[in-house]
Image (tube, rainbow, N blue to C red):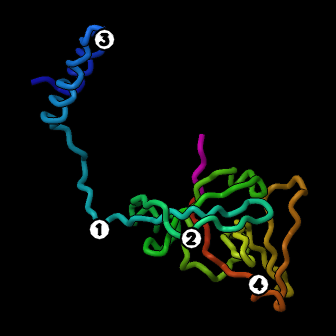
Amino acid sequence: MFSPKDVIRELSSRVIDPTSGSGSFLVEAARYTEENRTERLPFELKKADFVNLPQYDVRASAGRGLIPINEMPVSETAFERAFLRKMGGAPDFCFMMWATGDSMLPTINDNALLIVDSSQRVVDHGRIYVFAVGNAVLVKRAKWRMDGTLELTSDNVDGNYPVETFRADRVEDLTVVGRVIFIGHQS
């Protein structure tokens, strides 16, 4: 019996000429490899260990604010519950969205994937949250001042992004969507 490595070694030694039809063995080799696969993962995956996170076509602005595009999920991706808990999230309350802009550089890149926990709506000093301000959606670092004023700040130190301040008289303008528990960057 051939192992998958043996099949790959044999296939890679052959020359494929698409004009002569000599590539038909690839279909047979793929079928053979799949039917005779004996290698298994060293652990068992259980459906209960995963949660499907909805991904929204709403972009949180790491800039001056964006209007939400669509509030319906556009897809779902399965994540391991233990991973989300390790990141500090409540798995059943997490969702995914994208960040747009450069105000949160170097922490959050443009087009970074964010996992947000919507159960975390009490703002802790120094943490990053997604906020809705009017119709705009922002991703900002929250900072409390001694007088109880909440500041939404950008990590980008180039000075182009002013601090947005919310005193008690403006608190109704602000909705905490949730805390960012994971930031995914493209390499």
Q: Is residue 41 above or below residue 68?
A: above
Q: Quickly name the residue at label 3.
A: 16
Badge 3 crowding class, 10 Å Cα cut-off, few under 14, some 14 to 19, many 20 or more, is: some
Task: Quadrant for residue 64, please give it.
Answer: bottom right
Q: Position of residue 164 (x, y in %)?
A: 84, 73
Q: Residue furthest bottom?
A: 169
Q: Give the alpha-carbon distance from disc 1 to disc 4, as whole Å.
A: 39 Å
Q: Is residue 123 above or below residue 67?
A: below
Q: Amino acid at mark 2?
A: Glu
Mark earlier in primary sequence (1, 3) = 3
Point out the frontmost of discs 2 and 1: 2
Residue 24 versus residue 148: which sits nearer the camera? 24
Q: Give the alpha-carbon distance from disc 1 to disc 3, as whole Å.
A: 44 Å
Q: Residue at x 41, y 60 (%)?
A: 79
Q: Amino acid at mark 3?
A: Ile
Q: Quickly name the residue at label 4.
A: 173
Q: Residue at x 14, y 23 (%)?
A: 2
Mark earlier in primary sequence (1, 4) = 1
Residue 42 versus residue 62: which sits nearer the camera? 62
Q: Is residue 147 above or below residue 90?
A: below
Q: Secondary structure at mark 3?
A: loop
Badge 2 crowding class, 10 Å Cα cut-off, few under 14, some 14 to 19, many 20 or more, is: few
Q: Amino acid at mark 1?
A: Ala
Q: Residue at x 70, y 66 (%)?
A: 139
Q: Quickly name the residue at label 2.
A: 71
Mark earlier in primary sequence (2, 1) = 1
Badge 4 crowding class, 10 Å Cα cut-off, few under 14, some 14 to 19, many 20 or more, is: few
Q: Quickly name the residue at label 1.
A: 48
